[in-house]
Every structure is written in structure tokens, then in C-alpha cells.
Amino acid sequence: MRNSSLLAVVLVVIGIGSLLGAFLYEGYSLRSNQQAALQQSQQQIPPGMMGGQGGGYGGMMGQGAVTNGQPVTIGQAIQTMRNVPSYARVISSNNTIVFESRQFNVFVLALSPDKAVNLTGRQPPSYTTDDAFVTYGLINPTLVIRSGASVQFTVVNLDTDMPHNLIVSAYGPPYGYMAMGGMMSGNWMPYLPPADYNQGSAHEYSYTINMNQPGTYWYTCTYQDHAQSGMYGQLIVTN
């Protein structure tokens, strides 16, 4: 009788072990199939949507995080943009700003093309067909900076219906639909939400980047298709 009971217990244990093994195997197989499907879908992403010069990191990464930043009035932002600091030399004839300091701030507005034209009285560069940056009265100007300069970028979004950011990248145009990649260390920036013109309020974000390596760089908005539509400018670091 005792042997029969022991045999029954052994059979139950074996049965439970078999069921558990089948369950674990099914879960492992499902996970493996999901990973394979994910890899296959990534391989099928069209060119220009993943990595590479002028491309991006694809998927939803270009939409990124949105932050409210620091509150600022629209009037304050426009006035600050118009007050050209002593260390900045604006050359309207070739749409260039030369910064003659080792530590300074670049104040940038991100906004729609019609507002950019209204604020500056100037037409954007021929490559800009939509939203743009405005810096000290110029639209998407070339920025010339000395090597070794510590540059604080202060960005205010004055657009009414689009988020914007500004990053400095080693990769230049032409850009794909998602224009991320080659960002310099320390200059990641979340997207700022649109301004509220009824309340007269906007959002501001600042970060600092050290420009130690001479060369040609680009500042861009990485929101989907913005750089592709010309929301970028050249940044030249000189000795």
C-alpha cells in the first residue's frame, strides 16, 4: 500500500514536470519568434530611415520627448532676439553671424516661415521651404565660432502648432525624414511644445556645448521632416 502511494506521488511529480517543461519551451519559442520578427521588420525599413549620414535613427525616435522648458513671454523672446549682443557681428549680406568671444549665448527662435519673414523682413534661404530658425534678425544663418568656445544655445519655440528642438550635428544636408545622428556630446535637447499666442506664453530651453574641434557642423531640428524641409543652418568652427 505504501509503495503504491509512493508510486502515485512520483507519477504526479513527473506529470507536473512535463507540463512545466512544455510551458517553458512554448514561452521560449514565442520569444524567439518575436525577436526574429522584430529583426526582420528593422531590415525592411526604407533607406534614409535608419542611421547613416543625412539619415536618422528611424522608428519613433525622431518624435522624442516633449518638455515644457522654462516659461517665457512671446514679447520677451522677440525682444531678446532683436537685441544683438556685443560679441555677435551680424553680416546680413551673406546671412552670417560671427561670434567673437570664448563664452557666449546664441539665442534662437523656432517658428513658422511666415512668422520668420514678418519678424525679420527677410526671405529664408532657398533651401528652406517650411519652418525655420531665427537668430539675431537672420533666418537660418551661418554661425561662425572660434575653436574652444563654450556656447550656450537658448531656444524658444514660437510656432503655433509644431514642436521643435535644436541639436548640433556633424552630418549635413540633404537630410532624410528623420534627421538624427552625429550629435555632439552634451547637446541632446527635448522638443519644446508650441507657443500659446492667446496667453502670450512660450517655452524656452538652454544647454551648453564646447566647440573644441575646428570644422563644419550643422544645427538642425530633429522633428520628423523638419530638417528635410530646410530647418537647419551651418555652423563653422575656426582656429
Image (cartoon, rainbow, N blue to C red):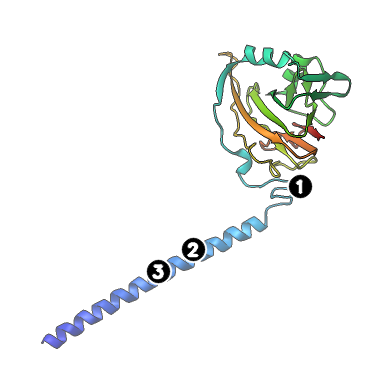
Q: Amino acid at mark 1?
A: Gln
Task: Between residue 154 and residue 115, name the one nearer to us.
Answer: 154
**Residues at discs 3 and 2 in contact (Cβ within 8 Å):** no
| Residue placed furthest toward the right | 93
Which residue does the numbered mark 2 point to in the structure image? 31
Q: Quadrant of the C terminus?
A: top right
The residue located at (70%, 24%) in the rendering is: 104
Name above or below for residue 124 compared with residue 226: above
Image depth: mark 1 or mark 3 in front: 1
Identify the residue position indicated by label 1 in the image. 53
User: Front-most of 162 and 205?
Assistant: 205
Q: Which badge, 1 or 3, comes first in the chain's sequence? A: 3
Assess whether mark 1 and mark 2 are in contact (beta carbons under 8 angstroms): no
Q: Which residue is mark 3?
A: 24
Q: Position of residue 229 (x, y in %)?
A: 76, 34
Instruction: Using the image, determine if residue 28 lies above or below residue 56.
Output: below
Which comes before the other along the chain, label 2 or label 1? 2
Left or right: 187 with respect to 24? right
Q: Secondary structure at mark 2?
A: helix
> From mark 2 to mark 1, how far is it between C-alphas?
33 Å
- Mark 1 residue crowding within 10 angstroms, few (<14) / some (14–19) / many (20+): some
Q: Give the residue drawn at x 85%, y 19%.
A: 92
Residue type at tag 2: Arg
